[in-house]
Image (cartoon, helix red, strand yellow):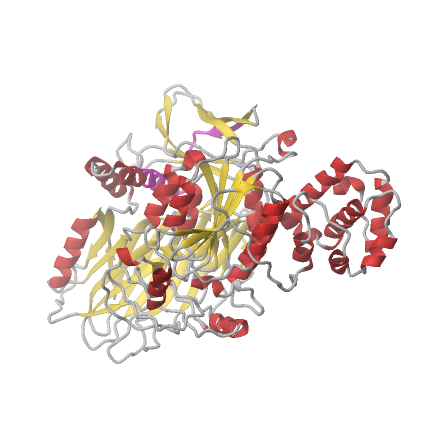
Amino acid sequence: MVNCCGLVSEKNVPVPLKSISVELQVRDHGVSVSSSLQYVNEEDGALEAVFVFPLPADAAVCHFSARIEEQEIVAELRDKQSARDQYDDAVSSGQQAFLLEESDESSDVFKLSVGCLSPGQSAVINIVYVMELSVQADHALRFCLPAVLNPRYTPTASAAGVPEVSSASVIPYTLSLSVDVRSSDRISRLESNCPLDPLVFLDALHTHATVSLSAGHRFDKDVELLLYYENTHQPRAVVEAGAATAQPGSLMGDPVLMISLYPEFPADVMSSLTSQGEFVFVVDRSGSMDCSMHNGKDAPMRIESARDTLLLLLKSLPMGCYFNIYGFGSHFESFFPQSVVYSEDTMEEALKRVKNMKADMGGTEILQPLKHIYSQSCYPDHPRQLFMFTDGEVWNTKEVLDLVKSHVHSHRCFSFGIGEGASTALITGMAREGSGHAQFITGTDRMQPKVMQSLRFALQPAVDNISVDWTVPEGVTVDMLSPPVSALFQGQRALLYAQLKGQSSGKTEGAVTVKYRLKDQPVTNQLQFTLKPTEDTGRTIHQLAARCVLRGLELEERAAGADTQALRSRIVELSVQAGVSSVHTAFIAVNTHSKQTITGPLLQRRVPVQQMAAPMFSAPMRRMCALAAPRMAPCAMPMRAAPKVPCNSKKKVSKIALGSMPKRTPMMESDSAMMSDDVMMDVSYSAPDPEPLPPADPLLQLVSLQKASGHWELKAALADVFGKTEDELANRRPAQVDGSVWATVLALIWLHTCRSEDQVEWQFVAMKAAAWIRSQKPDGLSQCVCDGNLLLGGHVTEDALEI
């Protein structure tokens, strides 16, 4: 096996990718990303290179150019087939040409073809895209530059033969990255998972700042940036002027408005979260889930973190709701034939099964379990909430998203991308089409806090009858470019794009009003804005709005079936007009200035893929495998790569190259021999009770002891969590207080005293416990809290415990 990455010469000499330079221009909630990639042909002959790399799923690619020596070639956006034909004609005639196109299967994968590089010649490729910054649980705005493109898992029925390439193991180039932030709000700080130089403020108001990645960074992991504004939740409106060269009345010729809203729900409604709902947890159990969450010391396995998260989720559910748990890989199975009522018995049975969950189900096929879930009838008055956990990517992303979209009226989908390289198209797309919320767990992030935030969203009362109304001066009309708002969550941003048509004779003020019903209460949120365009915004808002419209048209096209020619024409027309890539267009550049024509056959070099496979060793050895496995950089990834391979595989893995969709590995074929892809294993019997070691984390140990109704029992295992004996707890119990009430009060005091920083994880556990105590109406509660504080060294009040 050849241990090189990037382009490999016939003699395995170093790759031609020499450096990657990225510049970020952040404007409030949007960012423009300019990436420059330098290549050198170190072959003895002319070279055609094919690079495949990841981009964020919601990115709008709006510029592509190449510099050959001193000659700058700016690409044009054209219909994809005609761009491909032009590229082929140019390369076959010996001209230098460049082609950039979006994958037909997934919007977060792009292929770059570089044709006819002469021996020793260098090329600098520049790609510019714009995107929205996502909002995190702590109100940070997140940007991620992906370094990993996971292999797309492809079932056998969809596979075709592919050529063979070698594996890669080193990354011989570096990344430089600079960030320029301008905002209408004060900038608090900027953090990263990679070393940064100090943040430099360029004005007294702290609304303009710059920062750079520390020199010498090896692009061996995702680069994540977290930007904090002082008032992140402040609603904003930005108007961007139309282009003077564009036709008036067109999207690019008219002003475009971007509204960022943060709905605030009434406090009395939010104080009591709903106890209704059907909660379906779908967990990836493919082989790669047996790899580490990150490359740090003592990093947990992904499947271990998923098990701990399911423990918290199961303990946090309200009594009387419905729930079920699915595991999927090459096939899938469910804990119960259909969702069951949440009770002490069903919770305990599910916990036994969770403790036995392993990453032992082969590849990653999400479509079949989703189809089965959607085929199940919903329970009246119990809205379905789907939680999807996966670390992978699938080849049929758009088919999955279309399926979720088709059932948006019967459920909400909350998705979680685990580890670096999880598909942004899949994770964000499922949440967007399912009117839910997406989260990414990368680096040293813990899964539990992010999942519990999404559970809070899922437990919020349902919002319905959402309407958006505009108040604008006479002579001005508003065309909504965003799809209708179908989901609103407390504290979650909603971005709206609108085209402003016409001219106002005098007034320059407008307003947008969002109305909805929440738990049968009418709610109104309004934002005033000015029609005067904001200065120095470029075309970012127009490009983001165009991308929003294009995504809607693409979805409509896929749903329309065969009669799609008119929609396809609209997509191409808008894409070319806005200069924003789509599934039906591609950037093409031909160097017509070159006086040199290449003759003779071209060497074609495709990017090799890293594959992770290791013998079935113990957990420490598997961790070593994960730590040793390198990460690939953006331009060192194939578009259609090898299926995901379990880290503990003993079987030989075939080598896969860029080309048509890959076949399964032998391991995955053997998995299918045991169970076909469309078969589900219904399990309704009680699983054997294992004898697992108690959780190492005292918080998880405490949570595991809580009963479904919310209380704890006075037992030795609970005393162990507190560092006490069972006799110590029993002897200090107030005489008039029941043992379970005493134990539950102690658990609440311990949570508030010893794990206050983790409140987001145990908030629902505590709410259930407090509600149970109130239902018991015990005597002597004040004395109970006082004695509990003395025993555990706390200073928690009854009000703080909400009992």
The front one of 549 and 674 is 674
**Which percent across, then down, holds residue 757?**
68, 53
Residue 169: name its quadrant.
bottom left
**Which percent across, then down, holds residue 92?**
12, 63
753 relative to 6 in the view: left or right: right
Task: Give the residue at the far top of this rendering.
Answer: 474
Confirm whether residue 539 shows in the render.
no
Looking at the image, residue 618 lies above or below residue 704? below
Q: Which residues are magenta?
A: 525-553
User: Quick check: is 541 in the magenta stretch?
Assistant: yes
Residue 319: name its quadrant.
top right
The front one of 749 and 567 is 749
The front one of 629 and 548 is 629
Looking at the image, residue 547 lies above or below residue 521? below
Name the residue at 53% across, 62% down: 196
**Which percent across, then down, holds residue 352?**
58, 55
Name the residue at 16% across, 63% down: 594
Confirm whether residue 18 shows in the render.
yes
Name the residue at 32% across, 76% down: 14
The front one of 739 and 171 is 739
Looking at the image, residue 575 lies above or below residue 169? above
Task: Give the residue at the far bottom of this rendering.
Answer: 11
709 relative to 104 in the view: left or right: right
Q: Quadrant of the N terminus?
A: bottom left
**Which percent across, then down, holds residue 29?**
47, 44
